[in-house]
Image (cartoon, grey):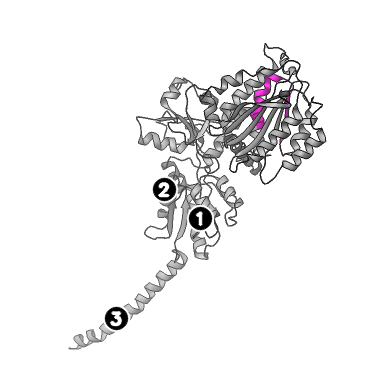
Amino acid sequence: MRTRSRSRLLAPLAVCVLLVLGGGVWAAAALTGRSGCPASPVLVTASPDVAPAISQVAQGISPGCRKYEVQPRDTAQAAVEFSAPGGGARPQVWVPDSTTALQGTRQRGATDVPESGPSVAGSPVVLAVTEGVARNLGWPGRTLTWPDVLDAPGVVLGLPDPARDPVGTAALLGLRDTVGSVPDPSGAFAAALRKFSVDAPGATAYPAAESFVVRHNADSPAAPLVAVYSPAAPALDYPFARLSGATSEQNDAVDALQQAVLGSAGTAAVERAGLRAPGQALTGHEGDPHVVAAVQPDAPLPSAATLKAVLSQWAGVNLNARAEVLLDVSGSMQARVPGTRLSRMQVTVGAAEQAMHLFRPATQLRVWEFATQLDGAKDYREVLPMAPVSEHLTNGDLERLSAVRAIPNAGTGLYDTLLDVYGLARSGWQPGVLNVVIVMTDGHNEDMQSVGRDALLSGLARLADPAHPIPVIAIGIGTDADEAELSAITAVTGGAAYVTRDPTKIGEVFYAALAKIATS
């Protein structure tokens, strides 16, 4: 009886104790949630290739605790969202594939995005080349370079959009280095850029992260890719960027994640993902002969000015255009170019023919010839009508262009021609394309019946409109070209003059002029 009564008395007490203990357990859980597991999980947005590694590290910090939520997100897509006003909930951490993505996003108005962060992984940017192309170039007995691939016949070159994808941006810097030692690197760079097409179908070589090649070869061993390295292409560096807005509890969790990702656990995780630990060679893939694990490109990240310059050159070469091209056919263009069997006229026409292949197929192009009194009192006449380059290349227009000849004893009717054609360009101005007038001449105005120099400059100034720009690009050929006059004329329109005393270099000068149009 006493025992039974004691049990009855102890039961309520036990319940009370359990309630108290339960409250203690709840409180402990609350404290744990406060110091170890924040009420809101830490949101991490990461490039898809590094996201699995970060998830593995996060799980190792607190098993069973949903403290971290790692969202794979394409870097370009995330950059657009973070730059947009009211772009939705921000993560506490962003790990894009390149520091250049942080800088670009911040420049577009996302002030909570830092300019840099510690690198958690690395992956060189390579040219991914099909094994068939690589073998045709002598691989594996020969170590391939980017110039080898660029100059190979029949290679179809693709490129991720450099304006959106850091791989494409790094590739531009690598390409610029491949032509850096030639006499006219700017023109050679423009010519190299024109070999690439964004998302080219059937590409047999294209820039990619080394980690992409590793994964591709593991998934598709029957169709492997060969990684071709460049010492000048900056590697992807996967910065760990802390965004503002985290609670103090979340900041503690971010600290723990950053420490773990930068430690041995992070090193192991990124290597399992086919990436490199920061500053290290690729490990664990020595069995794949298509990837050179020992190569460690160490090109520095570009400055903001350098990045802007290469992107502007890419835009200038790849924008569709509406171009008026003026060819001087005065008698002096018959002069022979020293050291060759060609006349100034022939090398000039050759450069114009090259331009047909330099411009994009949709570019609208019209070609004029000018001297003195070619069409009644007019100093100019049409050679090719305004039409897409694709049509010029398929309907026999190159033959018509090749037939252009200098006219003996004719003078250079520059002023009237340029003013009238610039007016036509103004009336035909189109939005969304590069509107430009290109004039090639070996001399200066010789038409005494034309408007004077002052009238030309004032007329161009009236027609010029900064909101609807039409730069004049003048290319002076040979020793008689008046550089000062051409510079004064082009400056009124926001253009530029380029003079080559060696007419055989006109092609290089032409490429350089087109490459710099977008930066003027």
Q: Quadrant of the N terminus?
A: bottom left
Q: Position of residue 327 (x, y in %)?
A: 68, 25
Q: Amino acid at mark 2?
A: Pro
Where residue 515 sits, quadrant-wise, is top right
- Depicted 283 relative to depicted 480: above or below: below
Residue range (magenta)? 493-513
Name the amino acid, label 1. Val
- Which residue does the numbered mark 2 point to in the structure image? 52
Mark 2: few, some, or many residues within 10 Å (few <14, many ≥20)? Answer: some
Please rate how many residues cluster around mark 3, counting C-alpha atoms within 10 Å: few if below 14, some from 14 to 19, many from 20.
few
Tags 1 and 2 touching, CB below 8 Å: no
Residue type (three-letter) at the residue carrying disc 3: Val
Viewer-nearest residue: 232 or 83: 83
Disc 1 to disc 3: CB gap under 8 Å: no
Q: CA distance from mark 1 to mark 2?
A: 15 Å
Q: Is residue 271 left or right of residue 408?
A: left
Residue drawn at point x = 65 percent, y = 25 percent: 508
Mark sitting earlier along the chain (1/2):
2
Which residue carries the number 3 mark?
A: 15
Image quadrant occupied by the C terminus = top right
Distance of mark 1 from mark 3, alpha carbons? 45 Å
Rendered position, 351 above or below 201: above
Quickly name the residue at label 1: 93
Q: Earlier in the sequence, mark 3 or mark 2?
A: 3
| Label 3 SS | helix
Is residue 298 visible in this depiction of the protein? no
Residue 504 forms part of the magenta stretch: yes
Of discs 1 and 3, which sits in the foreground? Answer: 1
Residue 414 lies, in percent from the top left, at 75, 28
Q: Secondary structure at mark 2?
A: helix
- Local packing at callout 1 (Cα closer than 10 Å; few below 14, some 14-19, many 20+) is many
How far from the left and from the top, in percent, is residue 64? 36, 59
